[in-house]
Amino acid sequence: MQKDNFFWVGGKNTIHEISKWKRRTIKQVLSTKKINTSENLQETLVDQKKINKIFNDPNFVHQGLAALIEKTKFLKDKDIKNIPDHSNIVLLDNVNDIRNIGSIIRNCAAFEISHLIIEKKINIDSHYLFKSASGATEHIQFIKVSNLNTAIQELKRNGFFVFSAALDAKQTMKEISFGSKNCIVLGSEGEGVRNLISKNSDEHFKIEHSSNIDSLNVSNTSAIIFNHLYQNTCK
């Protein structure tokens, strides 16, 4: 594999999950102390300064552990047809904050979301995202597309119902009925789901909450929605 096909991640949970699930190659592991795990990681002992230099951010909490790992392998919109029945997936529209995406990925894994559709411009191979996801990147499949509306049409052709979260929706989350294949669309906090994507969705829903605030953080919103979806389709 070429050198540029790898990137650094940090943090114990992140590296533990990557090692445990073996979905990608781990090329090198650096640690400030001996690792006591069952995954037989072959670490190189280094001082704290070496790992600090890799991430070049004094606020990044790497816990004295860094791994050079293989970049994520993406599916394409043509692969949507292979997603089986009784699947729940998520599409992110203009959600760009890496840490938020990492938290959403963690929520996906917690509530059995099988696939996450993102735009081509999003680079998820970031140590910030992987730390925020805390290993959940290894539990879902990623689909990277150049046009989200084209992806939505492909989803519909393959039996998916597409539901967009919207602050101005008439029905609440609890009032919608899910199908056997569901796609939840989440938009950015500032703009929400864009007009054409909203128009191409089958239904829209809102989360009921106190009038003390206008809206929730998109990662918090995702946890509420995914839990409701899980309770109604996976149990």
Image: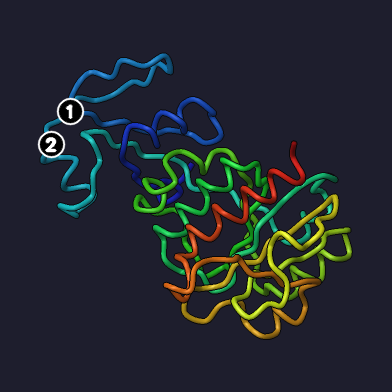
Q: Residue furthest bottom?
A: 195
| Residue drawn at (47%, 67%) of the image | 216
Amino acid type, residue under disc 2 in the picture: Gln
Above or below, comparing residue 24 to residue 5 in the picture: above
Above or below, comparing residue 183 to residue 47 in the picture: below
| Residue drawn at (35%, 43%) of the image | 9
Above or below, comparing residue 221 to residue 189 in the picture: above
Provide residue 183's location: percent of width, then percent of height. Answer: 73, 59
- In the image shown, does 25 or 176 lie closer to the viewer? 176
The image quarter in which residue 140 lies: top right
Provide residue 68's location: percent of width, then percent of height. Answer: 36, 39
- What separation in Å lies between label 1 and label 2 (alpha carbons)? 6 Å
- In the image shown, does 192 or 93 lie closer to the viewer? 192
Q: Secondary structure at mark 2?
A: helix
Q: Secondary structure at mark 1?
A: loop
First-in-chain label (1 vs 2): 1
Provide residue 180's location: percent of width, then percent of height. Answer: 85, 50
Q: Left or right? Give the position of 100 relative to 155.
A: left
| The C terminus: image quadrant | top right
Amino acid type, residue under disc 1 in the picture: Thr
Number of callouts:
2
Above or below, comparing residue 195 to residue 158 in the picture: below
Confirm or deny contact between disc 1 and disc 2 (CB under 8 A). yes
Provide residue 178's location: percent of width, then percent of height. Answer: 81, 56
Residue named by callout 2: 48
Residue named by callout 1: 32
Q: Left or right? Give the position of 64 relative to 148.
A: left
The image quarter in which residue 131 lies: top left
